[in-house]
Amino acid sequence: MVKIVVLHLFQKIKLTFLFILIIIIVLLSSCKSNDFRIQMLDFCENHEKIKLSDISDFDWDIAYIDRQHYMSGEEIKEKFGIEGEFEQLPTDFSSRLAFCKDNKLVKEIILNDCYIEFDSSVEIITPDTIFLVEWLQKGESKEEKLILVLK
């Protein structure tokens, strides 16, 4: 009798562990937008130039940079005729990359301007746009900021 209870308890523990593992996998896979920023930083550490199409794993034909802090994206939706819903930019130090295919939003990446910044003259990016990679030391810290300058 004790043996059956122990086996039953062991099966419940295995099922609970499996359930927790599935939840962790789902949560990690939903953090895909962070992956793009990390991929960008990792790629730029070892390269002098970058095309965003080299690191994107989704199909797009144009991307827009939105620097309107605290805004909802309505301005670039109207300006460029983009279909889709945007997140609110959370801070003064946020910008967004809006990747589109046939004027439909495919992927939105919220960037922290303290870590990644695009050339201020750039508003539109195509898959063939090439940026030069520059690193700027942030104050007295050892941290560096990635600056992407239009080639």
Image (cartoon, grey):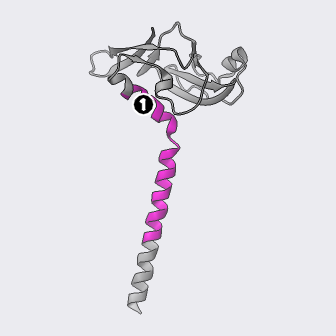
> Is 68 colored magenta in this rendering?
no
Q: Tell me which residue sits at (59%, 25%) in the image.
A: 99
Q: Tell me which residue sits at (34%, 15%) in the image.
A: 135
Vertical arrangement, residue 38 with respect to residue 125, above or below:
below
Mark 1: secondary structure: helix
User: What residue would you read off at disc 1?
Assistant: 39
Quadrant of the frame with the N terminus? bottom left
Quadrant of the frame with the C terminus? top left
Vertical arrangement, residue 41 with respect to residue 25, above or below:
above
Q: Tell me which residue sits at (47%, 20%) in the image.
A: 51
Give the main secondary structure of the magenta stretch.
Answer: helix
Name the residue type under label 1. Gln
Magenta range is 14-42
User: In which quadrant of the rendered view does residue 50 lie?
Assistant: top left
User: In which quadrant of the rendered view does residue 123 lie?
Assistant: top right
Residue 18 in the image: x percent, y percent?
46, 64
- Front residue of 9 and 122: 122
Dot 1, crowdedness within 10 Å: few (<14), some or many (≥20)?
Answer: few
Residue 96 in the image: x percent, y percent?
55, 23
Residue 129 in the image: x percent, y percent?
51, 14
In the picture, measured across the screen, residue 5 lies left or right of residue 61, that is left
Vertical arrangement, residue 42 with respect to residue 67, above or below:
below
Q: How many marks?
A: 1
- Front residue of 58 and 10: 58
Vertical arrangement, residue 31 with respect to residue 126, above or below:
below
In the picture, measured across the screen, residue 33 lies left or right of residue 100, that is left
Residue 133 in the image: x percent, y percent?
38, 15
Q: Tell me which residue sits at (50%, 55%) in the image.
A: 23
